[in-house]
Amino acid sequence: MIKFKKSTPNKDARRVLVIDDEPAFTRMVKLNLEGTGDYIVESLNESRKAFEVAKAFKPNIVLLDVVMPEADGGDVAQSLRSRSLTQNIPIIFVSAMVSQEESKKGFYQSGGEHFLAKPVDKDTLCGAIETVLLTLK
């Protein structure tokens, strides 16, 4: 049996909400990010519940899948941005529809939006989160 090291979040841990319809992806992201001790992660596999979960969890950033069956990433982003409680939370879109080459080694910005290509490794993911959060300070 593989045991994952559970890190205790540091006092400055950032809160990350991961919204993706693939439970295996959200579980992998949660394990990888929380394993660093720098993040507290809430995952959601039902995109229609995004606002309620974001309102309760109060994330510093959202990782959002683009293609989902209930409401796609564009719909979810529009919903979050149209409400005063969640409008300023930065969003990084994560998609298998974007190739690694297109996304310039995993992370890029287009039309004011940030994108990551799936599959994404832990270093690229952490780097993208920190880059976006630093640009907001």
Image (spheres, rainbow, N blue to C red):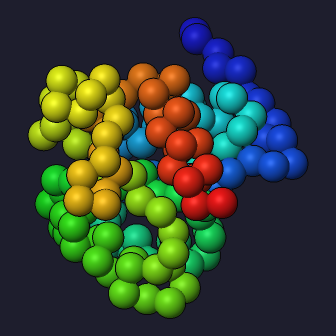
**Where, by quadrant of the figure, is residue 101 drawn?**
top left
Q: Position of residue 112 (x, y in %)?
A: 31, 60
Asked whether the viewer can see residue 80, the reply is: yes
Describe residue 67's horizontal placement relative to residue 84 as left or right.
left
Vertical order, 90 against 40 (above or below)? below
Q: Where is residue 113? Give x, y as percent.
A: 31, 57
Instruction: Farthest residue to the top: give it.
Output: 1
Q: Residue at x 32, y 81 (%)?
A: 79
- State how many labels appear: 0
Residue visible at 53% across and 58% down in the picture: 61
Viewer-side residue, 133 vs 77: 133
Image quadrant holding the N terminus, namely top right
Which residue sits at x=32%, y=70%? 77
Q: Is residue 119 left or right of residue 15?
A: left
Q: Nearer the viewer, residue 58 or 56?
A: 58
Which residue is most to the right? 11
Q: Position of residue 109 (x, y in %)?
A: 31, 48
Q: Position of residue 85 (x, y in %)?
A: 54, 85
Query: Quarter of the image holding residue 44?
Result: bottom left
Q: Quick check: can you spot residue 119? A: no
Residue 54 appears left or right of 107? right
Place residue 124 in its image quadrant.
top left
Query: Residue at 50% across / 25% down in the picture?
Result: 122
The quadrant of the rendering that contains the C terminus is bottom right
Q: Is residue 100 left or right of residue 115?
A: left
